[in-house]
């Protein structure tokens, strides 16, 4: 796995693991020995000492189990998580410091329980921060690094404490005083390590409380219990987690006490447990890396199985060397099960929500914006604000994505991220008022870097056929597709619509027997392939109707001219007559070898959502708009690459290449792929009378319309339910 660079917030979060782990290491090593001394002085025998120590741990666990869900639900409200986390942390820190100030075993146990409750409760909120601190993809790694560095970092104050306890007598420091100082060192270490997290963490996932926060908490808690019961995977995991993690912590808490009760050498026990920390460090990191290759749930099951074996081994423990073996085994799996359990839960529970806003920005110009669930209406954000958000999101996820062509087909990789950014920057002036042409050039160029392994498909038709997810030539151009499957996933949308809606029963078979007779070409598109309408071939074919399409391609001198002309006319004089306007032949449910797909009705044809050709078009346009040295030549080379692939022989010279030509080239390359509206708005052509096509503005000749139609109206249901949303001008 590639090494990840931690953010400042992720480092601060991990640092708290380093701080609180010092306390739990003290709990599993020196504190049981110290309590044993207090118990002996108080007249308790070894069996009672061990029992009372176990009871104290059970009481603290029970208290956390009772108050944890209530406090956790309260902390989910806006502004509550950090203060409650800090209060729990302070209870733990102050309790740790105070343990050195009590003399009797009973008072010590009471203070210990309070400190343990503070520690365990703080972890409830600390673990809940994880989905806000990092991404789902990095969660296993960050969680594992937290435990790993917690193990190794906690050794620093522990060694100081251990040296003080074992050798303090040589400098005149008694065991009792040494323990008091040890408690203070641990408490101070814990407190200091918490400060960066308190400084940097901001609660971003929350629910709004209405009325009293207390009543709101109990209402939310009730809803959560109901929802958890309905979501069986979460419910069963929580149930299992309660039992197996309690077993893990019991082993941690009782290890030293158990060894002491068996009469094992104290110094040897402490050194063995110190070894556990050093073993757990690389093993925790290793499990974080394993999670990138294997299912996290499977890894947790393996850790539980191994821990079960470790527990059975401990039953028969009688000698010092066996305790050392036990320490190594615990270190191997302890960090893994703790870290992966934490991150797995963080991924399956909702961390509120964030969404895709690009489409709403492009379509409506503004959108209700929220990153969390709330009863409050989400505020309205402008296109500029949405632009900044989308850009920041793309920046933050890039390093977490697979390298180009390394993700499974249909999954986004870095090239998809770059292409979306290039598309964003190409339209930046529309959304924000500020052009970003050079940024569009940069990110389109990153996509087009030959080292990425993407390339143009040699046959344009094959990009839109049923095996475009298997055909190596098609796959090398498709950066991200919307997956379709005629067997596993069936609907009347997707590529089914694109094939059926453009088909009539008199047309060549395209792998679906469901002609809808809906969509035809406008003459304005045909004219971009044929400067003279008289050049369009309308010959009749009966035996091999595909030959008609081949004639059209030959006459257009462009293999992208996938139109059927038999029985059609170029002019779309009647919007209700399917034979007015040429028929599209671009999308097909046939395989590239001519064989049928899985289903004769529902297509297998994936929809190329991002493909390499778009990067060429973005960069060419951005070159011309940005200007500068060699701009014309660079743009011409990008356009030439696409026309060469299309076997198109006609292309203007570099000096005569214009923005309008690139707009036409976008139409020839990208028709029926959902780009035209956005392109025309960017050019200022969508509503103006300077650029007309048939039936624009409701007339056959075409006419300009009001510029208000550059944006869609905000749906009435949205403005009625969300009073923060205002209607777009003119509607």
Image: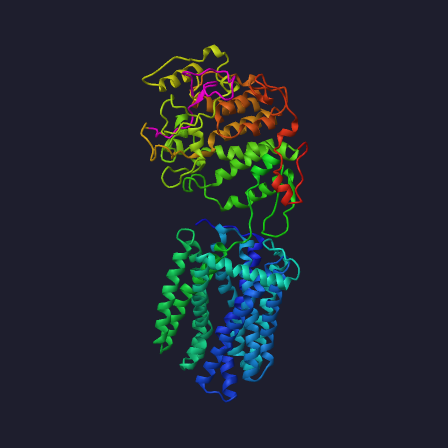
Is residue 456 visible to us here?
A: no
Colouring convention used in this rendered image of the protein? rainbow
Q: Does the magenta run of residues contain 254?
A: no
Against 504, residue 98 (above or below) is below
The residue positioned farthest toward the top in the image shown: 534
Total tally of numbered discs in the picture: 0
Return the residue nearer the eye: 363 or 729.
729
The residue positioned farthest toward the bottom in the image shown: 43
Residue 721 quadrant: top right
Against 67, residue 613 (above or below) is above
Instruction: Check the picture and name the quadrant holding the C terminus.
Output: top right
Expressed as whole percent of the image width and height from the top left, the position of residue 641 reads: 46, 24
Expressed as whole percent of the image width and height from the top left, the position of residue 320 reads: 38, 76
Against 107, residue 700 (above or below) is above
Against 599, residue 281 (above or below) is below
Instruction: Read off the magenta span.
Output: 563-592
Return the residue nearer the eye: 388 or 592.
592
Expressed as whole percent of the image width and height from the top left, the position of residue 433 reads: 66, 33
Return the residue nearer the eye: 597 or 50.
597
Is residue 590 visible to us here?
A: yes
Q: Does the magenta run of residues contain 566?
A: yes
The residue positioned farthest toward the front in the image shown: 576
Q: Is residue 544 left or right of residue 451?
A: left
Q: Main secondary structure of the magenta part?
A: loop
Expressed as whole percent of the image width and height from the top left, the position of residue 635 reads: 54, 24
Taking the spot 60% from the left edge, 43% from the top edge, the residue there is 389
């Amino acid at each position: 796995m590639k090494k990840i660079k931690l953010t400042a917030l992720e480092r601060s979060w991990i640092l708290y693991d380093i701080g609180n782990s010092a306390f739990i290491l003290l709990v599993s090593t020196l504190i049981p020995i110290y309590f044993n001394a207090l118990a002996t002085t108080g007249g308790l025998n070894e069996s009672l000492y061990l029992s009372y120590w176990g009871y104290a741990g059970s009481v603290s666990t029970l208290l956390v189990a009772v108050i944890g869900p209530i406090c956790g639900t309260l902390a989910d409200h806006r502004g509550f998580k950090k203060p409650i986390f800090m209060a729990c942390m302070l209870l733990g820190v102050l309790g740790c410091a105070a343990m050195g100030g009590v003399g009797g075993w009973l008072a010590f146990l009471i203070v210990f329980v309070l400190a343990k409750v503070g520690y365990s409760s703080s972890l409830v909120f600390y673990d809940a921060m994880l989905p806000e601190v990092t991404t789902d993809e990095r969660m296993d790694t960050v969680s594992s690094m937290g435990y790993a560095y917690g193990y190794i970092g906690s050794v620093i104050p522990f060694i100081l404490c251990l040296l003080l306890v074992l050798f303090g007598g040589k400098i005149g420091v008694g065991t009792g005083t040494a323990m008091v100082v040890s408690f203070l060192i641990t408490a101070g270490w814990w407190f200091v390590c918490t400060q960066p997290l308190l400084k940097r963490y901001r609660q971003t996932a929350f629910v709004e409380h209405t009325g009293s926060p207390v009543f709101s908490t109990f209402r939310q808690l009730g809803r959560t219990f109901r929802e958890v019961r309905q979501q069986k995977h979460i419910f069963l995991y929580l149930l299992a987690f309660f039992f197996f993690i309690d077993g893990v912590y019991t082993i941690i808490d009782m290890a030293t006490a158990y060894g002491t009760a068996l009469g094992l050498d104290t110094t040897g026990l402490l050194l063995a447990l110190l070894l556990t920390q050093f073993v757990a460090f690389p093993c925790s990191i290793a499990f974080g890396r394993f999670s990138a290759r294997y299912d996290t749930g499977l890894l947790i099951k393996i850790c539980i199985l191994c821990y079960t074996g470790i527990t059975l081994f401990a039953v028969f423990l009688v000698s010092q060397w066996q305790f050392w073996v036990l320490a190594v085994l615990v270190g191997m799996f302890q960090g893994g099960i703790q870290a992966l359990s934490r991150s797995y839960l963080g991924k399956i529970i909702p961390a509120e929500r964030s969404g895709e806003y690009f489409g709403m920005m492009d379509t409506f110009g503004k959108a209700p914006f929220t990153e969390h669930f709330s009863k409050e209406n989400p505020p309205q954000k402008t296109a500029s604000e949405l632009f900044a958000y989308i850009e920041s999101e793309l920046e933050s996820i890039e390093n977490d994505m697979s390298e180009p062509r390394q993700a499974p087909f249909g999954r986004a990789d870095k090239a998809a991220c770059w292409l979306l950014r290039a598309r964003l920057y190409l339209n930046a002036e529309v959304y924000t008022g500020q052009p970003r042409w050079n940024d569009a050039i940069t990110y389109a160029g990153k996509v087009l870097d030959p080292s990425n392994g993407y390339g143009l498909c040699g046959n344009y038709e094959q990009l839109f056929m049923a095996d475009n997810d298997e055909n190596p030539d098609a796959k090398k151009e498709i950066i991200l597709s919307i997956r379709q499957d005629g067997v596993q996933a069936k609907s009347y949308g997707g590529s089914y619509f694109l094939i059926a809606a453009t088909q009539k029963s008199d047309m060549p078979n395209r792998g679906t027997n469901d002609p809808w007779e809906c969509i035809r070409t406008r003459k304005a598109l045909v004219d971009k392939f044929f400067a003279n309408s008289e050049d369009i071939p309308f010959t009749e074919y009966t035996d091999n109707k595909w030959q008609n399409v081949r004639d059209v391609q030959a006459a257009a001198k462009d293999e992208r001219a996938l139109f059927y002309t038999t029985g059609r006319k170029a002019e779309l004089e009647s919007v209700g007559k399917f034979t007015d306007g040429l028929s599209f032949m671009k999308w097909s449910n046939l395989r590239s070898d001519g064989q049928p797909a899985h289903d004769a009705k529902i297509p297998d044809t994936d929809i190329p959502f991002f493909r390499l050709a778009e990067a060429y078009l973005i960069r060419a346009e951005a070159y011309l708009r940005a200007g500068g040295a060699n701009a014309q030549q660079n743009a011409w080379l990008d356009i030439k690459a696409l026309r060469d692939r299309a076997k198109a022989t006609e292309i203007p010279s570099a000096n005569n290449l214009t923005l309008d030509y690139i707009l036409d080239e976008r139409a020839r390359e990208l028709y029926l792929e959902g780009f035209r509206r956005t392109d025309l708005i960017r050019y200022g052509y969508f509503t103006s009378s300077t650029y007309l096509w048939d039936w624009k503005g409701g007339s056959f000749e075409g006419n300009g319309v009001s510029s208000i139609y550059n944006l869609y109206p905000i749906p009435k249901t949205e403005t009625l339910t969300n009073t923060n949303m205002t209607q777009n001008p003119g509607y």
